Image (tube, grey):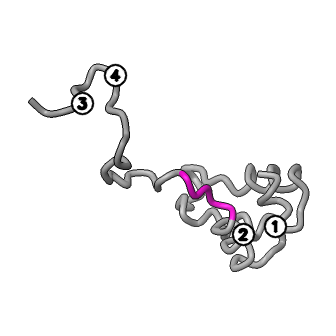
Amino acid sequence: MTTLAKALGVTTAELQQAMQSARPDASSGAQPGDQSAALAKALGLSEAKVKAAMEANRPTDTPPAGDGGAPPSGSTPPSGAAATPS
């Protein structure tokens, strides 16, 4: 979070407060994907700047949720699973 705050030119505390206020709730009708717009508004920044900073600071070692792709080669199967099909 510190890296994202620095990229946006705000303090970590300001970013945390903006994220709290930008969090969608059931009554607002806002979609989770609208977070960058809400965050930009809460911070007084352009949506483009917020989106760019979020993209640049996204973890690269974690696949997107729901990827469903095969594990990397050489991966160990979960405990209790057979290493090779029988």
Indicate which disc, 4 or 1, sits on the residue closer to the N terminus.
1
Indicate which disc, 2 or 4, sits on the residue closer to the N terminus.
2
Q: Looking at the image, is 50 positioned above or below residue 12?
A: below
In this rendering, which labeled residue sits more in front, label 1 or label 3? 3
Disc 2 secondary structure class: helix
For the point 59% across and 66% down, the residue is 34
Looking at numbered disc 2 in the image, what kind of residue is underneath it? Answer: Ala
2 and 1 marks in contact (CB < 8 Å): yes
The image quarter in which residue 10 lies: bottom right
Separation of residues labelled 3 and 2 (CA atoms) = 41 Å
In this rendering, which labeled residue sits more in front, label 3 or label 2? 3
Looking at numbered disc 3 in the image, what kind of residue is underneath it? Answer: Ala
Separation of residues labelled 4 and 1 (CA atoms) = 41 Å
Mark 2 sits on what residue? 53
Q: Residue furthest top?
A: 80
Disc 3 secondary structure class: loop
Looking at numbered disc 4 in the image, what kind of residue is underneath it? Answer: Ser
69 horizontally vs 15: left or right: left
Indicate which disc, 1 or 3, sits on the residue closer to the N terminus.
1
Q: Residues within 10 Å of mark 4 (few under 14, many from 20)?
A: few
The image quarter in which residue 86 lies: top left
Indicate which disc, 2 or 1, sits on the residue closer to the N terminus.
1
Which contiguous range is marked in magenta? Answer: 57-61
Mark 1 sits on what residue? 7
In this rendering, which labeled residue sits more in front, label 2 or label 4? 4
Mark 4 sits on what residue? 79
